[in-house]
Image (cartoon, rainbow, N blue to C red):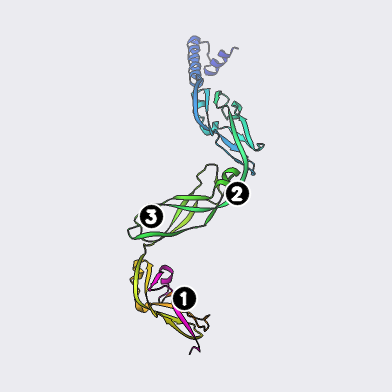
Amino acid sequence: MSAFRRIFKAIDPRPDKHLKDKAIAVGLALLVWVAVNVEEAVPEIFDPVPVVLENLPSDLAIAGDYTQTISVRARGSQRDLGNLTQGRLSPRIDLSAASGGENVFQILPENLNVPSGVQIERIDPAEITIVLEDSLEKDVVISPVTSGEPAAGYEIVGWSTEPEMTRISGPRSVVEAVERIETSTVDVRGRSESFTQVVTLLSGNTLLELREGREVNLQVDILEQPVTIEFEEVPVEVISAQYQVAVNPDHLLVFLRGPPSLLEQIDGEMLRLVIDAAELTPQAEDYLIAPSIDFVQEGFGELIELVTTYPQRQINVHVFDQRAR
């Protein structure tokens, strides 16, 4: 029994009746099936297709630019081509057997993961050169980058990062040339107080790798711009004297430099000039000693600087051959 007759009998136990009509119906059904399931092969270009590098030896690093994407021309049915993605087409290059210097890798159609009904017609470029070099790691300082100016009357007096250094790795020739890693730009415009901010480290070179993460804490110290103020008749006091001591002059005009808000809080009772006489012994000639500034209130000495004293910076200190009382 022919195939048609078996089909007809399965459909109708009396296949000889209206045989011609039934044959036409089956033929039309077959044509519809073919039209649905058999599509004409068409070309399509996939661009860019990323190249994936794998198994780079730990003692080597990529030392130069290389072709990171390719263009692929494929031919197949619309259905098969529609299921393709650039990631699926990506060639995977195994670097496990690579060595220092130039390494050339061919990209063949069989390196691409495509369905059996898809034909690869062109790969551009068909080969990739990758230059490798001995890798190196080292620690470098972190250098903050700021923009803008603080509020009027204020200035940046310092900064610090936590951590202070970061570890980088990459090809030896590149790593050896790096002395610092900069941060993302921090805007200090209009600020009048110190602040802390999380910033991002920028390697500045795609061949460098930041081994300890890309974020650090940045502390920016902002204070008032210092001014210089004079204080009249500041007394000179001798401390820790083992012998009787006389100073000349015993009062001086003092010039202090620091934040205006702090200087405005200083009065005569808070301020004195001090000479430490603990190591001074009697002698015929006077000692010439520059007194230091002393504040009654703690913390002022860290932010306020003694500029000079008038009429002289060093004063005469005479030590008598008599024990101090």
Pointer 3 or 2: first along the chain:
2
Residue found 42% across the figure and 72% down from its top: 313
Comparing 262 with 324, the one in front is 324
Image location (x, y in percent) of residue 119: 56, 23
Report helix, strand or loop for mark 3. loop
Q: Given the current orientation, which residue lies at the most extreme right position?
A: 97
**CA distance for labels 1 and 3:** 43 Å
Image quarter for residue 315? Answer: bottom left
Image location (x, y in percent) of residue 241: 49, 84
- The residue to which callout 2 is attached is 137
Residues in magenta, as a range: 297-325
Comparing 18 with 109, the one in front is 109
Residue found 57% across the figure and 15% down from its top: 6
- The residue to which callout 3 is attached is 188
Image location (x, y in percent) of residue 268: 35, 78
Callout 3 crowding tier (Cα within 10 Å): few <14, some 14–19, many ≥20? many
Pointer 2 or 1: first along the chain:
2
Comparing 42 with 204, the one in front is 204
**CA distance for labels 3 and 2:** 33 Å
Q: Choose mark 2 or mark 1, whichever is in front.
A: 1
- The residue to which callout 1 is attached is 289
Amino acid at pointer 2: Glu
Q: Does 312 appear in magenta?
A: yes
Q: Is residue 250 above or below residue 23?
A: below
Callout 1 crowding tier (Cα within 10 Å): few <14, some 14–19, many ≥20? some
Image location (x, y in percent) of residue 295: 41, 75
Pointer 1 or 3: first along the chain:
3
Q: Is residue 273 above or below residue 200?
A: below
Q: How many numbered callouts? A: 3
Q: Viewed as shown, does residue 191 lie left or right of 290?
A: left
